[in-house]
Image: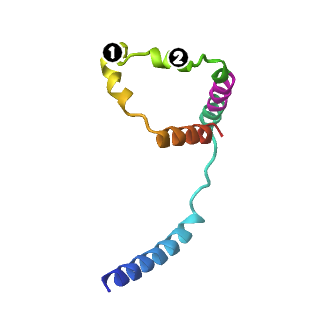
């Protein structure tokens, strides 16, 4: 029963907030892009394009080279990360990479 009352209160607060929002939207100025925004957008597009161009050219390790790497060869700071590989995390990191590029 308590959840029902909380839901009603949240609904009433959202209605009141919507009315307040609509009263202020006419007086607030709309967002205007400045020169800085265009520079940041251009820089982001340029860096993403450079990445897309250079990424296929970066050398990848072969299976034999991966098996030849020993954890002792990795620096002390990064060594603990060599024990934390997850196929699910690998898949999701690729998905977020592609979404970030898009």
In the rendered image, the vertical position of residue 79 relative to residue 5, given as above or below: above
41 or 86, which is in the foreground?
A: 86
Q: Magenta stretch: residue 18 in it? A: no
Q: Which of marks 2 and 1 is nearer the N terminus?
A: 2
Which quadrant holds the N terminus?
Answer: bottom left
Q: Quadrant of residue 25?
A: bottom right
Hey, which quadrant is residue 73 in on the image? Answer: top left
Say which element carries label 2.
Answer: helix
Q: Which residue is drawn at 62% across and 26% down?
A: 47
Q: Is residue 70 left or right of residue 30?
A: left
Measured as percent of width and height from the top left, residue 32 is found at 63, 47
Label disc, if present, on residue 64 of the rendered structure: 2
Q: Identify the residue position indicated by label 1 in the image.
A: 72
Instruction: Find residue 82 and name its label.
Output: none
Judged from this view, the residue extending furthest toward the bottom is 1
Rendered location of residue 58, percent (x, y):
61, 18
| Disc 2 crowd, CA 10 A, few/some/many (<14, 14-19, 20+) | few
Question: Quick one: SS at disc 1?
Answer: helix
Q: What x and y, as percent, mark residue 68?
A: 45, 14
Magenta segment: 44-53
Residue at the image position 32 percent from the left and 27 percent from the top: 80
Q: Is the magenta stretch mostly helix, strand or loop?
A: helix
Which quadrant holds the C terminus? Answer: top right
Where 88 falls versus 27 (above or below)? above
Q: Where is residue 75 in the image (x, y as percent from the top left)?
A: 34, 16
Distance in Å between CA atoms under marks 2 and 1: 17 Å
Tag 2 and tag 1, C-beta contact below 8 Å:
no
Q: Measuring 63% from the left and 25% from the top, which residue is drawn there?
A: 51
Crowding around mark 1 (Cα neighbors within 10 Å: few <14, some 14 to 19, many 20+) is: few
Q: Nearer the viewer, residue 98 or 39?
A: 98
Which scheme is used to colour this image of the protein?
Answer: rainbow
């Amino acid at each position: 029963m308590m959840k029902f009352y909380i839901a009603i209160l949240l609904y009433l607060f959202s209605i009141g907030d919507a009315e307040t929002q609509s009263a202020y939207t006419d007086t607030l100025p709309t967002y205007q892009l400045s020169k800085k925004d265009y520079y940041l957008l251009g820089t982001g597009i340029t860096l993403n394009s450079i990445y897309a161009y250079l990424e296929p050219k970066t050398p990848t390790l072969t299976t034999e080279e991966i098996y030849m790497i020993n954890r002792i060869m990795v620096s002390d700071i990064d060594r603990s990360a060599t024990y934390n590989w997850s196929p699910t995390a690998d898949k999701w990191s690729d998905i977020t990479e592609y979404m970030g590029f898009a």
